[in-house]
Amino acid sequence: MDGFSLLHPQGRIPETKALTAEATNDLSLDFIIDALTEEPYEKNLIKQIMTEITDDSAVIRYRRDVFDDFLRSPRLRDALSELVKRLADLREIERFQKDQEASSLWMLINRLREIDEYVGCITELKNTLESIGIHSEGMLRLREIVTQIFSESGFPELKKDIDETFEKARRLRSITIGVNLDGLLRPKNAGVVSLNDKEFTSSGLMKNFLRFIDNEDDLNHGTDVENIRNFHPANPNISSVKFGSVQLGANHNVHVDTNDITGADPLSDALKKCVTDILKRTVKDIKSTLKKYINISGYALINLLPEIIFFIRWAELTEKIQATGMPLCKAEIIEAEKRACSFEGLYNLKLAINKARGEQIDIITNRLSFDDEKRIFILTGPNRGGKTIFTQAAGLAMLMAQWGVYTPAKAAVISPCDNVYTHFPADENDTVDLGRLGEESKRLAEIFEVATNRSLLLLNESLATTNVAEGLYIAKDVVKAMRYLGVRAIFNTHMHELARELDEINGATEGDSVVASMITGVSEGKRSFKVSLAPPQGVSYARDIAEKYGVTFTQIKNEIDNK
């Protein structure tokens, strides 16, 4: 079981890079995680997986195939969901395993009850994995492990032990104790007299005590308690109030230190200690049995909880999105060295989540392809024309493919990236010291310090400033640096001049990542949100909008002349 994971093959632990806080925010990962689950505990687990990026193609294929099994089998998800619930309740068993002081019989019985749940859970999981069609390397290996746990961990014997112990515990109904008094009727010692299979029904303890004082004949002579019943106690309802200290003696009696003024004593606590002490041998035997079963490798399944939750929640979200009619595909994974990537019918996952929640949205899909001919795109278009949505869509689709889940597209082929770096507009509060242009330049420099030719860079309205000349000057150098490094990138901007000078940039800079112009379209004055390879449109966008609303000079002049 050591080293087994549903996120990577046995013996192949991938190198990962952490997704930056900026990329996590710019790509709205928290929004997506909120759509996956409402449980804070699960959100933290899922986010940890989603922000650790690997570009190991073999690892990604392994994850993708595991997810395929989760998605195809609701029954598998149901069984594993039940496993998640039960294992979450059993996490305390690992602590108990390390607790050498625990000897309370009632606690041991509670542990047995929990292990009984675990046995049932493993049995159900084994039956499920054996009866459904699974194909991935990870799930086939999990089936082998679960079958091995079931066959080699003595589950039938454990089940028998648990049933016998429970039967003994269920027979205990009351405990009789004896208390020695001093000359002032203060308790000196307390000991267990008998364990009984019937409840104590006499009421009015003070009434009985006064009756003993009034009638000497009611006093028992001697302390003959030979006929002690031997039963296993369950979890007694013992008061947790403590009035003094208790010391156990070798004769199973409890010495009680009483308060000199009130005569108060911890009899209730003494009772608990007496029961534990008098049944030491039973406790020892059961604890030995427990350790035998607690040490089974099955408890290593607890380590799979985050991965199981991750795949279950993504499968559930995938089904919800597919139910809206939007496509999601199993991406083809090619080697990272090729630095290629293509998506057919690409769209932004955030829009699909909103659609699955009931919003009436017409989602426009697009094509995107990074290859040896074009790896860097300067994306221009009108305000609210879909540039940011498209830029986000590319980053999310790449990450989802590398997480191993289905990608928001009709078809996808990707060379994994080693990380996604984003450069979106900064909060105004973050630009006080350096100014916006200075702060953005600083962040870009930090990205280039860590980015490689396998990285994906997403720039959203970067270097947009009131001084267009300054912003354009820095933007040209940034694009040249991206070409020289060899990254894949989308730079969406209003600087049409930058897109017009790409021939100069490509010709003047060494590198194999060619820069190309991409535009978001406007048709008949309406934003189509379609993206295509084309030179920047410049004022043509404004002309279309002006004509739609009748504010061209010719239209206004005609309106004036016809008054």
Image (cartoon, rainbow, N blue to C red):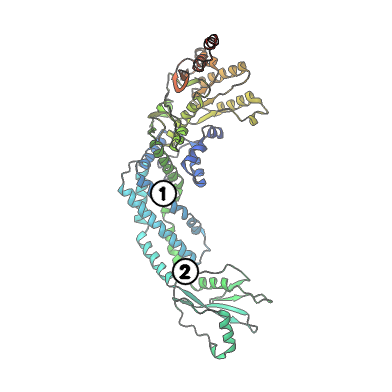
Comparing marks 2 and 1, which lies closer to the viewer?
1
Residue 358: percent from left, percent from top: 44, 37
Q: Which residue is mark 1?
A: 81
Give the camera-side residue of 10 and 343. Answer: 343
Residue at the disc numbered 2: 234
Please tell me which residue lies in front, 277 or 545.
545
Q: Residue furthest top?
A: 561
195, above or below 449, in the image:
below
**Residue 143 falls left or right of residue 387:** left
Label placed on residue 469: none
Q: Residue at x 62, y 74 (%)?
A: 265
* For residue 358, side relative to residue 253 (left or right): left
Q: Quadrant of the C terminus?
A: top right
Q: Residue 145 location, x and y as percent?
A: 37, 49
With respect to residue 111, does 418 lie above or below?
above
Give me the C-alpha separation between circle 2 and circle 1: 31 Å
SS class, disc 2: loop
Query: How far across and down, in percent of the image, does residue 68 sit?
Result: 36, 39
Which residue is pictured at 50% across the width and 43% down the height?
A: 43
Total numbered labels: 2
Residue 269 occupies quadrant: bottom right
Relative to 45, residue 177 above or below: below
Residue at the bottom extreme?
217
- 118 relative position to 450: left or right: left
